[in-house]
Image (tube, rainbow, N blue to C red):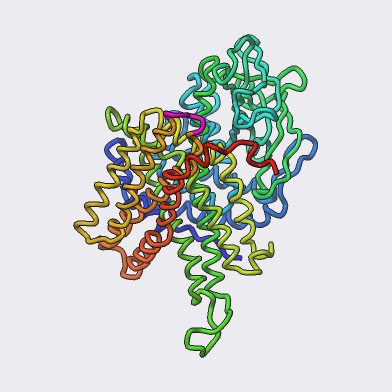
Amino acid sequence: MSEYQYPIKDILFSLQSVARIERVTPYLEDPIDNDLLDAILGEAGKLSEQVIAPINASGDKEGSRVENGEVIEAKGFKEAFKAYSEGGWIGLSGDPQYGGQGLPSYIATAVNEGVQAANLAFSLCPLLSLGAIEAISLHASDELKSLYLPKMLAGEWAGTMNLTEPNAGSDLAAIACKATPEGDAFRIKGQKIFITWGDHQMSDNIIHLVLARLPNAPEGVKGISLFIVPKFILNDDGEPAERNDVQVVSVEHKMGIHASPTCVMSFGDNDGALGYLVGQENEGIKAMFTMMNNARQGVGLQGLAISERAYQQALEYAKERKQGMNAARTERAAIIEHPDVLRMLMTMKSQIDAMRSLIYVAAVENDLSHLSTGEQKKQSIARTALYTPIVKGWITEQAQEITSLAVQVHGGMGFIEETGVAQHARDARILPIYEGTNGIQAIDLIGRKLHSDNGSEMTKLLAEIEVELKSIAQTAQNENATKTLVIVEQAKKATEACLASMKSDSVLGTGLAYDYMMLIGYLVGAWLQIRAQHESLQSDTMGVDEKASWSCSVDFYCDHILSRAFGHSHSIMFGKTTVDKLNKNAFNR
């Protein structure tokens, strides 16, 4: 089992040369220089490698359990969470008014790549806390912010999202949890399921954000409100005191992320759990999407992180494992010398490079959506919205392939749990499912993002890609750019076809959504890979071997991965009738 190594050089290159973090600098009160960035990420790497990674396999084996109504997490997790919190990592991009450090979120994203790769199950607790922090920051009253944000940003209190119910999964309109007014507060009653880190002993309090309905609320999503429901009610000094009427019913037995307790939560078995309204009545869906969009970008990052962890282990194994003879038939060869193993490793590596570029480009755009002003802010809000379903959907689909290939590189040993590589594949399988399945991400892209503005923002993105690729093709004689321009034309036609299909029938039109999401994902990946290749070749600090490695990755991607876009384009252009004809009767035999 390999030790995780934080890929700081690749991360810095993606941030500086591909994502172009200097775009954010004009909007910062205190600009981030390269030395400070190096120092922060260097310390983040140590935390991930030395504190969080070593309890990944043991946590997977031990899991979590319920004892006397409390969830007990795996050994070592509480100590790791304490180190993470005391290091100030959770408050990196938080509001300084409440104890945060006010750094741009691209730095927090880079830190979290290491935490998530080191231990995906552990990382889910701070991920959900960050989503709750953002929702409270943007939607809660000043009083609630002052009460809850300082402790949450310090990592002393954790946060959760409580959306799903037994009869209301992705269909939030079916939520039945009730909220009854009582003075300045509310009494919450209902059950929530699939609540990640819904209970644990790692923090002094847990701040649940709960979706519920007020009496006489409108039906559907327009009648949902959001409430803070703390595990412990605060006393007059703002400290945890009386236990709230919140109980853990059970923890789920899952395929992966065993050390992350996925809880069934019961609110209000007795008098009702005390809750406090966040934002306006019946506008919880707005605040919920703040949490969801934060989490969706975070899940895309998880896809990159677990892929990197699996790739590192496969690469190390391929270098050490002797099998067969070398080409000269003079001695036994490490399997990394075999062409098919090289193919698998570069299939992994080239996609990881593209995934990382997209993650950090999206992170920079997200920063600009919050920090910039005027037309730039408007543009970045729209671009962030467009990137989000691709980040979550396309990247987590690639994670399935990459973690599976890591098992394949190990051969029979990959199917044995003791090698540890199977854990990455099991852990990764949840990523296309939670925080909105990838089918929902695809529908969001083709519906809420493409159809709603008649393709305006997507057309802008494709135009930007085309301009940059043409420039690189002409000035650098880059054949990869020329190849990718062909896919740009395919994407333009696919966009027109999807828009026409959605206008004709917005329900049947979503049958093209998955292929469209994947097509755009592969194209954006190629665009950013080519930018990375171009920047690496221009670099004065990158060595010859590093430049060659980047070129190998980009060349392979454009020859072997980008070609998949043709298949998705074909399905969009020629497969609509087939999809439209599908119904439940197609399976009656």
Q: Which residue extends farthest right?
A: 68
Picture coordinates of residue 109, whole percent (x, y): 45, 45
Q: Residue at x 66, y 13 (%)?
A: 180
Q: Which residue extends farthest bottom?
A: 330
Picture coordinates of residue 518, whole percent (x, y): 46, 47
Q: Quadrant of residue 332?
A: bottom right
Q: Nearer the viewer, residue 570 or 208?
A: 570
Q: Is residue 38 magenta?
A: no
347 vs 361: above or below:
below
Q: Is residue 237 visible?
A: yes
**Is 399 situated left or right of 452 in this image?**
right
Picture coordinates of residue 510, whole percent (x, y): 49, 35
62 vs 342: above or below:
above
370 vs 533: above or below:
above
Q: Nearer the viewer, residue 398 or 580?
A: 580
527 vs 444: above or below:
below
Q: Nearer the viewer, residue 71 or 252?
A: 252
Please identify the quadrant where the C terminus is shown. Answer: top right
**Is 508 situated left or right of 210 in this image?**
left
Q: Quadrant of residue 220?
A: top right
Q: Residue at x 48, y 74 (%)?
A: 339
Q: Residue at x 70, y 20 (%)?
A: 189
Please identify the quadrant where the N terminus is shown. Answer: bottom right
Q: Is residue 539 visible?
A: no
Picture coordinates of residue 526, whole percent (x, y): 37, 53
Q: Residue at x 28, y 57 (%)?
A: 482
Total tally of numbered discs in the picture: 0
Q: Which residues are magenta?
A: 503-508
